[in-house]
């Protein structure tokens, strides 16, 4: 039996954002990815936490950050 209500949390490390308005750009773009339920960008640590459907790929999340104009990669913490 599959639990269809499960959510995956992915951590990304980002580069290139220098101001709080960059945070809003990233949150808006990543939030548009189908299956994403929450995005939290930590400006001081350059960390992005994304809660999403397990079917949403990390590549899709990284691509959304890139579309916002920044570079990101998966991170263990």
Image: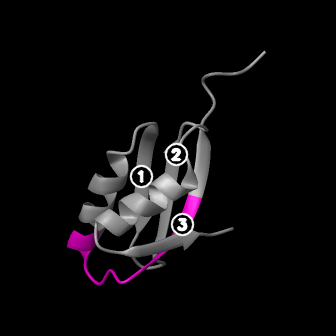
For marks 2 and 3 on the same chain, the one whose residue lies earlier in the sequence = 3
Q: Residue at x 54, y 71 (%)?
A: 73
Of the numbered discs in the image, which one, if any, rests on residue 51? 2
Q: Are marks 3 and 1 in contact (CB under 8 Å)?
A: no
Highlighted range, magenta: 11-22
For marks 2 and 1 on the same chain, the one whose residue lies earlier in the sequence = 1
- Residue 77 seen in render: no
Q: Residue at x 62, y 22 (%)?
A: 4
Q: Give the structural element (helix, strand or loop) at label 3.
A: strand
Check if residue 18 falls in the magenta segment: yes
Q: Which residue bears the numbered disc 1?
A: 39
Residue furthest left in the image: 21
Q: Quadrant of the N terminus?
A: top right
Q: Which residue bears the numbered disc 3?
A: 12
Mark 1 Cα within 10 Å, few/some/many (few <14, many 20+)? some
Q: CA distance from mark 2 to mark 3?
A: 11 Å
Q: Quadrant of residue 41?
A: bottom left
On the image, the x and y values in percent for residue 64 come to 37, 58
Q: Is residue 62 above or below residue 31?
A: below
């Amino acid at each position: 039996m599959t639990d269809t209500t499960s959510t995956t949390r992915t951590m990304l490390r980002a580069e290139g954002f220098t101001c709080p308005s960059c945070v809003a750009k990233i949150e808006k773009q990543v939030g548009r990815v189908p299956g994403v339920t929450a995005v939290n960008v930590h400006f001081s640590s350059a960390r992005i936490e994304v809660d999403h459907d397990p079917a949403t790929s990390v590549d899709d999340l990284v691509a959304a950050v890139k579309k916002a104009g920044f570079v990101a990669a998966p991170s263990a913490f």
